[in-house]
């Protein structure tokens, strides 16, 4: 069975060039051109590795990396960046990225990094038994809800997940709005009044 690699890159030409290299190495490739977690979730479920652009026009790759590492801690993620910023690369590695590749991507570097990240990902999955980190996910959702005074729409936007997803997570983890906080409608609706 071929390893499936998800490419999250807004530049379609770069994504096509990466895909060509990976297909020539006998990998299966999927694309996601949007940063919204809801649209990524379906592809992530079956991916063995994610190549994630750091600066997406509709989202922050570093934040997406953090969410991915909570949802799928054993999934290897390799960041792609156009900047030569060592501080940014270190931040990505601290957040759980396997590596950080700089554009323009050299074919050899891409292939070597993908092979290494996949081998580490397979070892991590075997060692951890693929146990989900639900406590960490619950903590992140609680923090986002508290930071937005339990405005669910804003918390969902902050986490880059859909409203339906955050409502499911609130129900799943039995999260309850503190009694001291009044029931609130969408802040945007309040501001327009």
Image (cartoon, grey):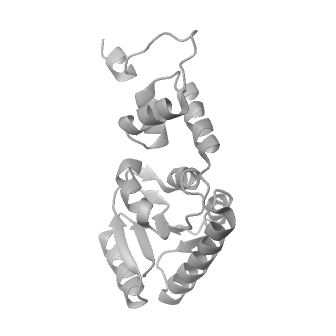
Question: Which residue is rendered at x = 33% and y = 61% of the image?
Answer: 33
In the visual, does 34 lie left or right of 50?
Answer: left
Picture coordinates of residue 172, whole percent (x, y): 50, 34
Image height of 178 relative to 71, above or below: above
In the depicted view, which residue is nearer to us: 143 or 86? Answer: 143
Residue 82 showing in the rendered view: no
Question: Which residue is rendered at x = 41% and y = 82% of the image?
Answer: 27
Residue that sits furthest to the front in the current view: 129
In the depicted view, which residue is nearer to us: 87 or 10? Answer: 10
Picture coordinates of residue 48, whole percent (x, y): 49, 70
Image height of 160 relative to 56, above or below: above
How many marks on residues?
Answer: 0
In the depicted view, which residue is nearer to us: 46 or 12? Answer: 46
Residue 93 showing in the rendered view: yes
Question: Which residue is rendered at x = 36% and y = 15% of the image?
Answer: 190
Image height of 56 relative to 178, above or below: below
In the depicted view, which residue is nearer to us: 117 or 100? Answer: 117
Question: Which residue is rendered at x = 62% and y = 60% of the image?
Answer: 92
Name the quarter where the N terminus is drawn.
Answer: bottom left
Picture coordinates of residue 91, whole percent (x, y): 65, 58
Q: Quadrant of residue 87?
A: bottom right
């Amino acid at each position: 069975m071929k390893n499936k690699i998800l490419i999250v890159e807004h530049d379609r030409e770069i994504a096509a060039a990466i895909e060509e290299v990976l297909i020539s190495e006998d990998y299966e490739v999927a694309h996601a051109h949007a940063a919204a977690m809801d649209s990524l979730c379906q592809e992530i479920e079956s991916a063995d590795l994610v190549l994630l652009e750091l600066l997406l026009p509709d989202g922050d790759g570093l934040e997406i990396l953090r969410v991915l590492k909570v949802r799928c801690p054993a999934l290897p993620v390799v960041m792609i960046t156009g900047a030569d910023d060592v501080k940014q690369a270190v931040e990505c590695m601290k957040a759980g990225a396997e590596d950080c590749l700089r554009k323009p991507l050299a074919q050899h570097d891409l292939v070597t990094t993908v092979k290494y990240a996949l081998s580490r990902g397979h070892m991590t999955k075997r060692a951890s038994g693929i146990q989900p980190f639900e406590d960490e996910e619950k903590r992140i959702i609680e923090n986002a809800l508290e930071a937005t005074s339990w405005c669910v729409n804003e918390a969902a936007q902050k986490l880059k997940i859909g409203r339906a997803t955050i409502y499911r997570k609130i129900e799943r983890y039995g999260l309850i709005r503190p009694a001291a906080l009044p029931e609130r409608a969408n802040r945007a609706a309040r501001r327009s009044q």
